[in-house]
Amino acid sequence: MAGPAPKSAPANEIDRIAGLACWRGRVGVEPLSGGLSNRNYLVRDGGARFVARLGADVPEHGILRRHEQASSRAAAAAGISPGLHHAGPGVLVFRFIEGRTLTADDLRRDGTLPRVLALVRRAHDEIPPHLGASKPVFQVFDVLRGYAETLKRGNSRMAGDLPRLMAAAARLELEAGPAETKFCHNDLLAANLIDDGKRLWLIDWEYGGFNAPLFDLGNLASNNSLSPAQMDWLLAEYDGRAPDPKRRRALRAMICASLLREAMWSMMQEIHSSLPIDYVAYTKENLARYETAWNEFAGAGA
């Protein structure tokens, strides 16, 4: 999930990671930036490097670490994500990928977006056979409805805006239309993509689950500020045909849904998170992005 990350690294967490039974000897542990539902650490074990992720279940966001573990294993088995070195209660340890973390600017440049879309398509098609009995689900409009109920019960400062936002969500769901579900990443930030110089890797499966694949395309477009021409290219390449006006509008609906989900995610953090982050400012920023997209969407459909 996007947003600023806390800077502190509790000593007890470093000790906990250093004490895991998976290491060959004495290890070095240092914090990595990023992660709002977990904390990430770089671990040096002899000449090998790993990334350790600490995080408990976050039920208000539908984050269950057993699902993240199953999804991570399946993504690694499909060759899409780095291998999982160790898994235990509240901790996952992954093989470190030597490479460059992508930026949104990278995705807007020629040559990168096709590589990213090819990897996303592989995730949709190739991860499910490796999931076994685990079938995590992330239906974005169900997520939004769940957020709204939790925010009302929690007396969110944004409670007065919820009827308007959920009426918009209902219209977006209708215009996005019914769709088959595939296993989606659901958090396609550029920061979740690593280029090792030969290939791309897709990481961070805490929101992974079965969803409409069009949400991944809308999420990719909204998170990385893709142009209308790039959005058309995404649809044409994914569908295998030029998009018609209805399909373009469905993608625009999912872009709005992605932005609304980010804003409501932050509203949830305002009342549930103990992390030292200005979520009120983050809500304001993302709600403004959503309102701009929604006004364009609603105006075009008037």
Image: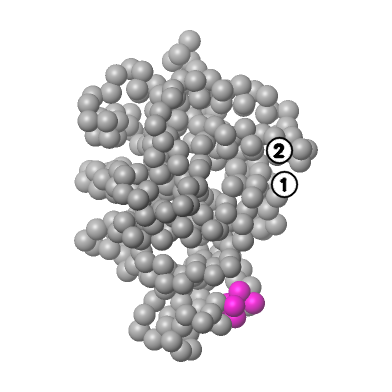
How far from the left and from the top, in percent, is residue 172? 50, 24
How far from the left and from the top, in percent, is residue 3? 54, 50
Are there few (<14), some (14-19), or many (20+) residues within 10 Å of tag 1? Answer: some
Are there few (<14), some (14-19), or many (20+) residues within 10 Å of tag 2? Answer: many
Of the numbered discs in the image, which one, if any, rests on residue 271? Answer: 1
Tell me what residue is drawn at x 51 percent, y 54 percent: 67
Tell me where residue 143 sits by quadrant: top right
Do the numbered discs 1 and 2 sit on residues whose CB atoms are within 8 Å? yes
How far from the left and from the top, in percent, is residue 97? 34, 67
Colouring used for the render: one colour
Is 31 above or below relative to 120?
Answer: below
Is residue 141 toward the left or the right of residue 185 in the image? right
Main secondary-structure element of the magenta-colored stretch: helix
The residue range painted magenta reads 12-16
Is residue 189 toward the left or the right of residue 172 in the image? left
Type of amino acid at the residue the image marks with label 1: Ile
Type of amino acid at the residue the image marks with label 2: Leu
Tell me what residue is drawn at x 63 percent, y 77 percent: 11
How far is mark 1 from mark 2, CA to CA? Answer: 8 Å
Q: Is residue 201 visible?
A: no
Dot 1: what SS?
helix
Tell me the residue that label 2 is attached to: 151
Is residue 79 toward the left or the right of residue 90 in the image? left
